[in-house]
Image (spheres, rainbow, N blue to C red):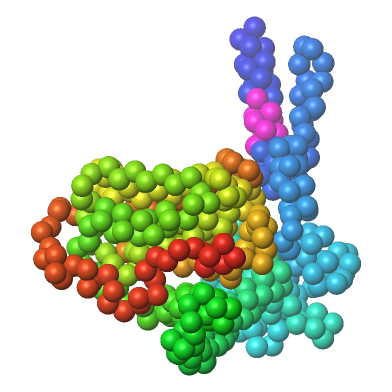
Amino acid sequence: MTRSRIDDGDRDEALLRARLADAEETLQAIRQGAIDALVIEDGGGNRIYTLHSAEEPYRVLVEQMQEGAVVLTAAGNITYANARFAALVGEPLETLIGTEIHRFVADTDREAFASLLKSGHGRQRGTLTIAGASLDVSLSVSTTAAAGGDHLNLIVTDLRELLEAQGSRERAERDNRTKDEFLAMLSHELRNPLGAISSATGVLELTQEAGTAAARAADVIKRQVAHIKHLIEDLLDVERVVSGKLRLQRQPLDLAQTVQRLMAVFMTDARFDWRLDIAGESLWADVDAVRIEQVLTNIVTNAVKYTPPGGRIAVALRAEGAHVVLSVEDSGLGISPRLLPYVFDMYMQADRTLDRAAGGLGIGLGLVQRLIALHGGTIDATSKGEGCGSKFTVRLTRIPAIVVDAAIAPAAHRREFDGYLAKPVDPNFSRAG
């Protein structure tokens, strides 16, 4: 009886050891990737567990990715490649397996590429040689540990589209600089003949009796020459700002007085319903007086350009915390949502003109933004859409009020560019663009 129990125990132990050995063998096979599925028997019948199902999404991802994916041995032999890599090198997938990756690498890059593979990780730019043609690529290497030895994972990214876009951007930037230089040169060349025309017009005015046809013609020439001079000054200012040559001559300035003085001239134009609201007797900022007058003149002129006769143009100045806020709002043609993000781009022209003959060069608002930025301020544009008017808001840092000698202050406004002081707006001209 005792002997029988011992024999039964031995058999049970042997059975358990056999099952344990089977389990260990199964686990080892799973680790090595030799098993694709397991069949488990239980009271409810056989159940099949597929091991590769968990990694299937990753296999699909690698196959469909837009970069070439290659698995290499330490020696550089290809053990796997996806369809994108095969397309890049122009060979069928079945011919790639087992071949060396080095045969696709340009001779000049092979040493660096070998060092990259040896390190097992990293990224470098390189050139693949395919059927005698060169292909610029980015090569990225990582290492994956496996039971049969480490594998090198190589990702190959085609750089042709990126390099083409970069080249296009560089060409555009170079062309833009050439354009700015040409416009600056043209502006300089035009100043001398315009000065001579302006002087000759002055002589004509002195020699003609007021009210005659000749006197009126001389007045037209004088006004149009002044407009052209303003355009030229804007073009030169663009060149100065872009090249970093424009220097501000900052001083404490009462913006309330400046706005009142400039708007007094604009408001003589009876074609519009003018509104002026200045909240406070004095609002001071540390600015370049001439440039701030230029900013206000360009913004208001822009409102005049896009507001039909009878429309409203409202100019407001107020303190807002640590800032002085200037706004110019009109009831004119408005700005479309498509154009609004680009309204301050240089040479941008709206297709919302009342009269395209008065179009301008599209530099006024772009120049305004750059001048405000040089002062450390901001400007933004808002509009509810076409036909709904627009509003431009300038914010400058406010400073405490200062007592300024009244005999000195007026001269500060006329130190260099007298032409920027506001003049009545010609209905057939606009500088704001």
Which residue is farthest top? Answer: 1
Count of picture labels: 0
Is 305 contained in the magenta span?
Answer: no
Q: Main secondary structure of the magenta part?
A: helix
Please determine whether, in this image, residue 372 is positioned above or below residue 124.
Answer: above
Does residue 238 show up? no
Residue beneath the point at 63% across and 12% down: 5
Residue beneath the point at 49% across and 85% down: 208
Residue beneath the point at 61% across and 84% down: 111
Q: 153 or 318, which is in the foreground?
A: 318
Please determine whether, in this image, residue 327 is positioned above or below residue 411.
Answer: above
Please determine whether, in this image, residue 270 is positioned above or below residue 288.
Answer: above
Q: 12 or 201, which is in the foreground?
A: 201
Q: Position of residue 65 (x, y in %)?
A: 74, 55
Does residue 386 show up? yes
Magenta residue span:
16-25
Is 24 contained in the magenta span?
Answer: yes
Q: Is residue 392 left or right of residue 340?
A: left
Q: Is residue 40 left or right of residue 301?
A: right
Residue beneath the point at 46% across and 68% down: 367
Q: Position of residue 86 (x, y in %)?
A: 82, 66
Q: Quadrant of the N terminus?
A: top right
User: Which quarter of the picture shows residue 360?
Assistant: bottom right
Q: Position of residue 369 (x, y in %)?
A: 44, 62
Q: Quadrant of the C terminus?
A: bottom right
Q: 357 or 178, which is in the foreground?
A: 357
Q: Position of residue 388 (x, y in %)?
A: 59, 41
